[in-house]
Image (cartoon, helix red, strand yellow):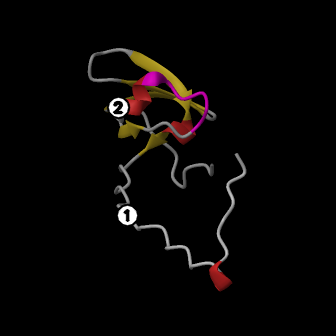
């Protein structure tokens, strides 16, 4: 993941998102929180319930991304076997 273009500042409102393997469990809810401290790549944020979580800056975003809705597609139908041959199952 790339670093943020503009550095985070204390008091800024951000969202936690699970982008790294070490993301805190609170990030899966994508809560809005406030930045408390920034130390190099580590960011400490305060959640709504008052708990503070320290995480990597890649787990913090300023705006939540829009969810991409993918179209459900049916798998392509298999063409019929040529010459009347049939498919023999392996098991």
Establish if 68 lies above or below 22: below
**Total numbered badges shown on the rendered structure:** 2
Residue 60 marker: none
The residue drawn where x is 59% and y is 36% is 20
Q: Is residue 11 visible?
A: no
Q: Secondary structure at mark 2?
A: helix
CA distance for labels 2 and 1: 26 Å
Give the quadrant of the C terminus.
top right
The residue drawn where x is 52% and y is 46% is 7
Q: Nearer the viewer, residue 60 or 5?
A: 60
Establish if 48 lies above or below 20: above
User: In the visual, does 63 lie left or right of 3?
Assistant: left
Q: Read off the residue under disc 1.
A: 72
Residue 2: where, in percent of width, then height? 62, 52
Label 2: few (<14), some (14–19) or many (≥20) C-alpha neighbours in 10 Å: few
Which segment is the magenta one?
20-25
| Extreme-left residue of the structure | 48
| Extreme-front residue of the structure | 84
Residue 29 marker: 2
Q: Is residue 79 visible?
A: yes
């Amino acid at each position: 993941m790339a670093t943020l273009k503009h550095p985070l500042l204390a008091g800024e409102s951000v969202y936690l998102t699970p982008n790294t393997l070490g993301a805190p469990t609170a990030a899966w809810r994508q809560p809005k929180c406030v930045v408390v401290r920034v130390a190099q790549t580590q960011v400490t944020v305060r959640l709504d319930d008052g708990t503070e979580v320290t995480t990597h800056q890649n787990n913090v975003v300023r705006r939540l991304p829009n969810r991409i809705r993918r179209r459900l597609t049916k798998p392509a139908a298999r063409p019929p076997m040529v010459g009347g041959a049939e498919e023999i199952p392996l098991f």
